[in-house]
Amino acid sequence: MTGDLTDSTLRLARDGLTLTARRAGAVDAPLVLLLHGFPDTPHSWDGVIPALVAAGYQVAAPWLRGYTPASAARTARYDLMAVAADVAAWAHEIGAPRTHLVGHDWGAFAAMLLAKQQPERWQSLSLLAIPPFGGGVAAGLWRHLPRQALLSSYIPVMQSGYSPALLTRRDAAFVRALWRRWSPGWDFGDDQFAPAAAVFTDPLMAWATTRYYRSLVTPWRGPTREFRRWLMAPPAPLPTLALAGARDGCLSPPLHRLLSQHAGAQHVQLPECGHFLQAERPDAVAETLLAHLRAADSPR
């Protein structure tokens, strides 16, 4: 590994907000952007980051807007187009010559949008728990939709005006229940849950983070229409890894496999693992990611 090693917190001013990211590794090494989802924080990557740094990469793990006090404001936008623009700004700010996109849940959607918008800017795309979307309707899709509709029944709840109060009550008990439902069998402790609890017991952050879901059903807004257009566009022409847990209780594993294969992505499913796979099995996730990143770094 070359260059000076860093392990620091970065801040970036955007849209009247102050965004925050964790950074580790050699400053002149290839960059891996690790993007978290809902209801989560960059701490879900804690077990993966050391392996990436030891393998010669630098890592930046931003908090998505709304997930820190300085990035939560009633006047700000909380939609995937804004988040994707934040991620692009982080890549520009850090200035690494090569950048790999790795996203989980909402972070996977942001990474997918960026890969489609500017494929020449990125070295590879890795999606955790979310498959690639776009490129037409996959054969056999319809038979998976009833099961997925049941798994996605939390979404209308998050879109309701009651959702911030629901998240904050009883020390984020609803969020804790989502973790258990989405990752059955994962015996996470209070220390692992504490960063998420700090976000979702704060009324303003709970409001901001649930606006992501509200933004999906506002077709009169330009960003909502733009998000749908990019989401349904053909998959990005990048080396793409679609990594899933075989016991994911949020997105149907068979549906994940179908959409990944339809998009031509490399599909990998980890057994005995749920939605928060990078926190549940960080060693296996790091090993799979590193194989993908190294292959993408090799001359094509």
Image (cartoon, rainbow, N blue to C red):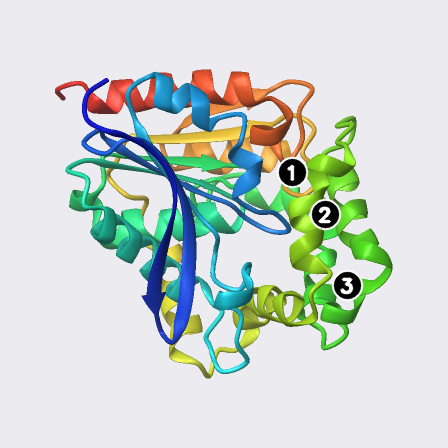
Residue type at numbered disc 3: Thr
| 245, 96: nearer the viewer | 96
Mark closest to the chain's N terminus, 2 or 1: 2
Residue type at numbered disc 2: Leu
Instruction: Give the percent coordinates (x, y) of residue 178.
Output: 76, 47
Is label 3 or label 1 in front?
3
At a point 49% along the width and 29% down the height, the residue shown is 243
| 150, 286: nearer the viewer | 286
| 50, 242: nearer the viewer | 50
Residue under numbered circle 3 = 168
Residue under numbered circle 2 = 151
Q: What element carries label 1?
A: loop
Q: Can residue 185 be seen in this view?
A: yes
Is 7 rendered above or below residue 73?
above
Instruction: Give the percent coordinates (x, y) of residue 163.
Output: 74, 69
Residue type at numbered disc 1: Ser
As measured in the structure, the alpha-carbon distance from the residue carrying label 3 to the one carrying label 2 is: 22 Å
Using residue 182 as the reference point, say whether residue 117 is left or right of it. left
